[in-house]
Image (cartoon, rainbow, N blue to C red):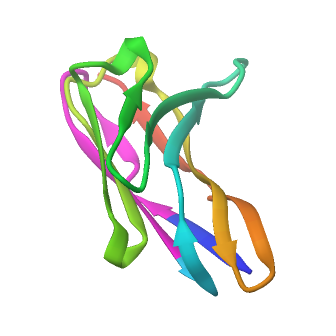
Amino acid sequence: QVHLVESGGGLVQPGGSLRLSCAASGSIFSIGVMGWYRQAPGKQRELVATISSGGRINYVDSVKGRFSISRDNAKNTVYLQMNSLKLEDTAVYYCNAPKVATTTGLLDAWGQGTQVTVSS
């Protein structure tokens, strides 16, 4: 069994910054791609950013130049540094690792979500 635990969400003013963290734990051999999704009220969940185990990175266009994803493979942890936050960044942010190699096979793991609210 694998658990992803997010932290770092909160309330911030427009233009502010937050750093999200997501730590994976359990009987893990390796983790491939890790990523962040978000879901705003009344909207579909959207992919925000991904990072491969080798460091290849992708961002959705709306966050390019403002958000930065990184990971610490030794700690099975992925981060999302969010700068210049906008009202439209308000959402629940979810961590995902779609291919976690464990003692029982490959798992698609999700975190419980952390709320990010951008408001003046």
| Residue lying at 53% horizontally and 57% vertically, measured from the top left | 32
Name the residue furthest right. Answer: 104
Front one among 92 and 46: 46
Q: Is residue 120 left or right of residue 98?
A: left
Q: For residue 71, what is the image quadrant?
A: bottom left
Residue visible at 40% across and 25% down?
A: 59
Does 5 sit above or below residue 57?
below
Q: Residue furthest front?
A: 54
**Does 23 appear in magenta?**
yes
Of residues 102 and 116, the one drawn nearer to the viewer in this rendering: 102
x, y (%) of residue 66?
Answer: 23, 24
Q: Main secondary structure of the magenta part?
A: strand
Total numbered badges shown on the rendered structure: 0
* Figure quadrant of the N terminus: bottom right
First to last magenta residue range: 6-24
For the C terminus, the quadrant is top left
Q: Position of residue 119 (x, y in %)?
A: 35, 24
Residue 76 pos. (x, y %):
43, 71
Residue 73 against residue 1 in the figure, above or below: above
* Residue 42 horizontal side relative to residue 73, left or right: right
Quick check: 80 above or below 62? Answer: below
Expressed as whole percent of the image width and height from the top left, the position of residue 20 reads 36, 52
Residue 15 lies within the magenta run = yes
